[in-house]
Every structure is written in C-alpha cells, then in structure tokens.
Image (cartoon, rainbow, N blue to C red):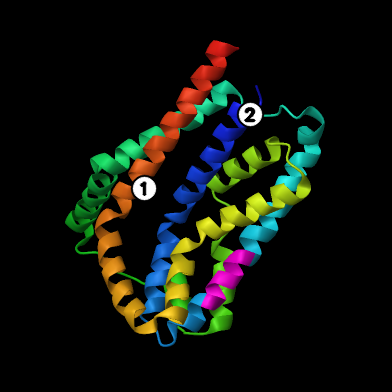
C-alpha cells in the first residue's frame, strides 16, 4: 500500500524540480552573464554558489524534518486538505500563465503608471549591476544569495523527508533535485566546455525562444502539478 504513494511522491518531486528550474531570476542572471566577457567563468562561479546554498540548506532542512518524526512514524505526509489547497494554487497559477492574465495585469499597471507619471525609466536591478562587474567571486556570492529556498523547493524537501528513505538515498535525492533545478546554468556550461562556438549561437536562439515561451511552459508545469496534487488529495479523502 505504501508503494503507490511513494511513486506518486517521487513523481511530484520531479515535477517540482522542473517547476523550480523555470526561475525568472536565474534566467535573467544567465542571460546577463552570456553577454559579458568570459561567460564560462562567470556561470561556473554562479553555479558553485547556487550549489552551496541549495544543496547545503536542502540537506539541513530535509534531515531536520526527518528528525522531527518522519523516521519514527514512516507515514508522515501532507494532509489531503493541504494537497487540495496547494494543488488549487498551482492550478490557478498555471491557468493565469496560460491565459495571459498575468501579462495583461502587468501591462495594465504599466499603462496606468505612464498615464499618471509618464514613461517609466527602466533601471537595472541589483543582481544585474553586480553581475555586470564580470567577477567570478561576485557571481559566486550572487548565486549563493539568490538561490534561497522557494515554495516548490520546500514542498519537495518535505516530501523527501516523508519518504522514509535511508540517509544516503535522501541525500542523493536532494542533490539530484538541485542538479535539475540548476539546469539553466548547467546546460550552457557543458556546452561551453564541449562545443564553445555552437553554444554561443545556441544561447542567442534559446534566449529568443524562452522570452516568448517561458510563461507558457511554466504554466503547463504548474497546471499539471496542481491537477496531480488535487487528484492525490481527493484520492486520500475518498479512500480514507
């Protein structure tokens, strides 16, 4: 009886990792670093900082959750109501992204601001200014600071703690999740080492594609994850 919920949890953890991968801040950081001299070195620094935070905090959090009773009970999971609420949130976010409502709301706010105050002057964010300095040490620090746990990451850690796996398997699951989460950094970096010329052209094409499809892709992932959580929560309520 435990096998089916465990498989469901592992699958949902994988989907959460994919959802965490589509991070606007990470995408912006990658784009900026690709435009600077020696992007391979800068991406390496950012990735090492991201690994330090995501893996280090992940291991600390998941074993803390495990020590709070996950090992003893072996049955600790999100309640059906929490599954339904979280699933509804993901489904609404996915629907909003796919329907373009978020983009429309943002455009509406921009127009109202321009009507009152005139065109808004675009300013670089703090990460953009820091990354623009081109230092590997700075990108390491920025990567560590900007990779603080998000909602999908924390939910995934809770699920890992509740799987009641051996410590080695749990640690490996955290590391794999973090590897998937940072794929927007890892893929260009591998390309820079194996095929630098091809990668430079591919980065430009990828940036163009993601600028038109990021919301749609993230919307589908959020919608699927939300539906799965709702189905699981409903199943727990029905099966008792």
Quadrant in which residue 114 is drawn:
bottom left
Q: Position of residue 166 (x, y in %)?
A: 77, 44
Instruction: Decide which of 203, 106 is in the foreground and name it.
Output: 203
Q: Residues within 10 Å of mark 2 (few under 14, many from 20)?
A: few
Q: Position of residue 227 (x, y in %)?
A: 41, 30
Q: Which residues are magenta?
A: 44-51
**Residue displayed at 46% across by 50% down:** 18
Q: CA distance from mark 1 to mark 2?
A: 29 Å
Q: Which residue is mark 1?
A: 218
> Of label 1 and label 2, which has the lower sequence position?
2
Position of 192 relative to 213 (above/below): below
Instruction: Decide which of 74, 120 is in the foreground and name it.
Output: 74
186 sits to left or right of 109: right
Quadrant in which residue 210 is drawn:
bottom left
Is residue 101 something one can see in this rendering? no
> What is the quadrant of the C terminus in the image?
top right
Instruction: Decide which of 123, 26 is in the foreground and name it.
Output: 26
Q: Residues within 10 Å of mark 1 (few under 14, many from 20)?
A: many
| Callout 1: SS | helix
**Residue displayed at 55% across by 70% down:** 47
**Residue displayed at 56% across by 27% down:** 82
Q: Total marks drawn? A: 2
**Residue displayed at 47% across by 62% down:** 183
| Callout 2: SS | helix
Is 48 one of the magenta-colored residues? Answer: yes
Q: Position of residue 52 (x, y in %)?
A: 65, 66
Q: Which residue is mark 2?
A: 3
Comparing labels 1 and 2, the label whose residue is closer to the camera: 2
């Amino acid at each position: 009886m435990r096998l089916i919920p465990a498989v469901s949890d592992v699958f949902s953890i994988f989907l959460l990792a994919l959802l965490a991968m589509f991070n606007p801040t990470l995408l912006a950081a990658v784009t900026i670093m690709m435009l600077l001299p020696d992007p391979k070195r800068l991406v390496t620094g950012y990735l090492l900082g991201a690994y330090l935070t995501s893996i280090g905090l992940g291991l600390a959090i998941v074993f803390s959750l495990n020590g709070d009773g996950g090992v003893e009970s072996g049955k600790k999971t999100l309640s059906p109501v929490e599954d339904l609420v979280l699933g509804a949130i993901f489904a609404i976010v996915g629907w909003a992204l796919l329907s373009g409502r978020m983009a429309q709301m943002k455009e509406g706010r921009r127009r109202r601001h321009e009507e009152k105050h005139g065109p808004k002057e675009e300013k670089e964010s703090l990460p953009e200014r820091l990354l623009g300095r081109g230092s590997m040490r700075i990108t390491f620090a920025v990567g560590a600071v900007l990779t603080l746990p998000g909602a999908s990451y924390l939910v995934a850690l809770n699920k890992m703690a509740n799987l009641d796996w051996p410590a080695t398997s749990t640690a490996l699951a955290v590391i794999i999740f973090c590897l998937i989460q940072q794929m927007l950094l890892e893929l260009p970096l591998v390309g820079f080492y194996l095929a630098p010329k091809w990668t430079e052209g591919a980065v430009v094409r990828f940036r163009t594609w993601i600028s038109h499809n990021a919301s749609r892709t993230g919307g589908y992932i959020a919608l699927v994850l939300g539906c799965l959580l709702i189905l699981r929560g409903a199943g727990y309520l029905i099966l008792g």
